[in-house]
Image: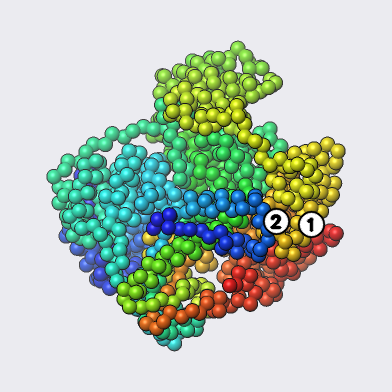
Amino acid sequence: MNIKDFLNDNFLIFDGGLGTMLQKEGIAVGSLPEVYNITNPEIVLKVHKKYVEAGADVITSNTFQASDLKLGASGYSVEEIITAGVGLAKSAGAKYTALDIGPLGQLMPPMGTIDFDTAYKCFAKQVKAGAAAGADIIVIETFSDLLEAKAALLAAKENCSLPVFCTMTYQADGRTFVGTDPKTAAITLSALGADALGINCSLGPAQLADAVKETLNYSTVPVMLQPNAGLPKSDGDLTVYDVSAEEFAAVMREYAKLGVSVLGGCCGTTPEYISKMREAVSDIKKPHIEVKHRTAVTSGVKTVEIDGDEIAVIGERINPTGKKRLKEALRNADYGYITGEAISQTQAGADILDVNAGLPELDEVSVLSKVSAEVQAVTNLPLQIDSSDPAAIERAVRLYRGRPIINSVNGKRESMDAIFPIVKKYGACAVCLCLDEDGIPNTAEGRLKIAEKIVREAERYGIPRESLIVDCLVLTASAQQEVVLETLKAIKLVRSRLGLKTVLGVSNVSFGLPARGIMNSVFLAAALGAGLNAPIINPLSDEVMRAVRAFRVINNQDKSAKEYISSYGEISNPAAPTEKSESADLKQIIIDGQLGAAEDAVAELLKTTSAIEIIDNYFVPALNVVGERYEKGILFLPQLMRSAETVQCGFNVLKASVPSGERVTKGKIIVATVKGDIHDIGKNIAKMLLENYGFDVMDLGKDVPAEKVVSAAVEQDIKLVGLSALMTTTVRNMKDTITALKAAKPDCKVMVGGAVLNEEYVKFVGADYYSKDGQAGVNIANEVFGVK
Amino acid sequence: MEKSEIKIEKSEVLRYLGHRGQELDGQTLQTLDECISETLRAIRPRFVYRLFDIRQSDAGMELISSDIMLRGESIKRHLCDCERCALMAATLGIEADSLISRSEHTSMTRAVILDACATDCIEKVCDIAEDEIKEAARREGFNTKFRFSAGYGDLPLEHQSEIIAALGASKQIGLTVTADNIMIPRKSVTAVIGFTKSDANHQSKCSVCENRENCEYRR
């Protein structure tokens, strides 16, 4: 019988801790147990058979670490280990054999260096080998990072037709090592199409109670549980676990009654545990679990659920339409500006961020994914992936850590044909615009009809209707005043007749009118009253956020008005202004590092002075004073940094006031942290100081391959490149980068810095200059560009 | 372990920041205090260790019943009077990395200070792990030597991945290592602690370091 059919009517019992049993058989500590599939097959088979005798329906192959990354030096290929491993599991005589896939043991960006495509390729190779060897299901287990689990899940779904089970591992504080909680994992993995999902390893069964309940509550597929035999304790040189087989079985029985239907064990669970557990659930009838329908989106570490009449604010600011500064940032790959927008919206109280990178001259497929990744690195909020290009949407959604919203699909045949396959495959939510080939209907009824059509079509794809969030669209009051109220009526109809949640780009209503904030906030309040759930707005606008926070008290979402009171409780009693400078002298402000004072001082000066004069007569002389004091040891690093940051604040005012075409630069410099190195705080300090002195700095980021540095330097005709390396092991990569750079562009000078570097290493890598700190980098740049 | 056991030392944080007696203004002191509390709020400290018998050979030190041979002269010298050792790994968790890198987007001053706080913090977590290991050693009648890490002297960084595998540190505490032997989370430490019957010696860590001549942090 097919395993999914079997699971419909029965508990499915997995085996226990294979590693534990192999250690009992004397496997060397730290060696790869997977190699035993070939060197000691009889031992692996013996262990498998013991679990079959104990009553396991499924035997998991000894292939947890059988990836290219882990097997590297073992002398065996992925195919050899997996073919042997699945073969041994099959010959143990259980009902089903599972191909076991564990995490790669290295992290993905922004934490680590293994990119999605590399991870996917590793997993795909394992999946193909396991399917070819005759596995019945794929088990992806012990994951911490949802994006890595997603890569594995997609690799399984796209390379075989076997059912895929997926488990995450949680610590005592209820989160995985990278911060994912059980609710977020259950929502994301269900949406991605896991056939069962759950929890394994880390803790004993009793300590997992909260995680199990959350998972049962939010999963839409069968729930799987494989706890440890308690917590590991060192007993001399051995590891022992503190929960007995009886206790283990008793707790598992309770979980089975609650609805956990796939049961097994992890570290420390010997065949005795499995046998006792099998017996403990033998007299329980598998309960029927009612699946709850929810509209919820996730990031890697957070869920935003839109429940009932609750509202969630979608921040609209990362969208270049009509925003000069953002367009410029996108063209120059200046992600610092974009992440700044993400951070400020997060701090202002957004719940979800819209991300749009659509500029005709850019390759949106790569840029949108890049922007989405950069934004995810600085915020915990879920994202709404916004594009008119289905290919750009698909790539960004595929690489997204969590369950995103897709913005958008509409009632046009072409749109639904292109977008719904993506919504279905990646389990996303989707913004559904009430327009079609005939445009936007003037009446609420007309818009409802389109919404109905979109829902019908989505259901043909098997997309759950609660993933659809309907945008009833608002026309501008200045042009089509007579139909503005139709939007509010349509929202009511969609909520009441279709039972769906609604989203709306609110600001459109005020286009062409003065004092747009007033219009926006009043219309927003009306729309919220009509049942709008997810306004797409500017969370930096106080006026609209006041309406949001007030409404959250009215709709009983902000319990006891906590957030409202903390936001506005002291509104009549504003805090004293922060350290306003007594001296208006910009130079002194910088020297003292008065962070709050620079912007006003620069704005004031700009009335009478040009930007370049401000740089030359204020920024640079003040920074020179600070730099000199730092070099003499009168100031230390945090004080230097604060002055530098003060200048940076001033620079932001200059940038906003000077058209980009007219910007004066003292020279363009590339900075990068070399391939393999992911620690870039030193490089970022150097970058900030260089920018403060008026240099144009192109930051290629961290873990940058040599080719990327070379091509950027050649394309932009760069005279100075700054490279940073932290570890002796990556100094090699620095040397390779410099060698390639000098070959391609001999006139380009290179300065290097980083914790392990010294004059000796500088010669070894072939650099022109050693920059012992950021301040030294400025002196080098001044020399290279002949700045006095 | 409980976070409340960890005390970040302001004087150590200042040392990492290159402070040598400069006048500390109020703003700097306030930021420092804020960063210390922020670090303690963010971190998820964990450690794991395991004891091994050891045997000296020509190439280095062999950890019996494991696959590990610690190579080089420095480790041989360091453990010459030891018959056992503890292998340990400790981390502040990925939250420390993310706190620092996110701060780089809003305030480099804070980022630099947070980085120094985390550096001292992981030392303190190692101290707590070491206390537990010392206790285990004492029960067996041993004294312990100072923590010796891959990268000290000629002990190759390539051992990182073996140490992590031997401790099951990926599964136990979420510690990983890249192909270039960089540990992630960044604020993590692995170390060997020798168990000796002789008096614990007072050799300093700095004396085995190849960078001792030009290191500004040398004690």
* Residue nearest the observer in this picture, B116 or A90: B116
Sort mark 2 into few (<14), some (14-19) or many (20+) by Cα contacts within 10 Å.
many
Residue A501, above or below A324: above
Residue at left offset 58%, top offset 16%: A484
Side (left or right) of A259 relative to B38: left
Sort mark 1 into few (<14), some (14-19) or many (20+) by Cα contacts within 10 Å.
some
Q: Position of residue B15 (x, y in %)?
A: 60, 64
Sequence-first disc among 2 and 1 = 1
Residue at left offset 20%, top offset 47%: A253
Side (left or right) of A218 relative to A272: right
Residue A351, above or below A230: above
* Residue nearest the observer in this picture, A22 or A410: A22
Total labels: the figure holds 2
Picture quadrant of residue B206: bottom right
Identity of the amino acid at label 1? Asn
Identity of the amino acid at label 2? Leu
Side (left or right) of A411 relative to B83: right
Which residue was labeled with disc 1? A624
Q: Position of residue A311 (x, y in %)?
A: 48, 28
Numbered tag placed on residue A640 in the rendering: 2
Secondary structure state at the residue bearing disc 2: helix
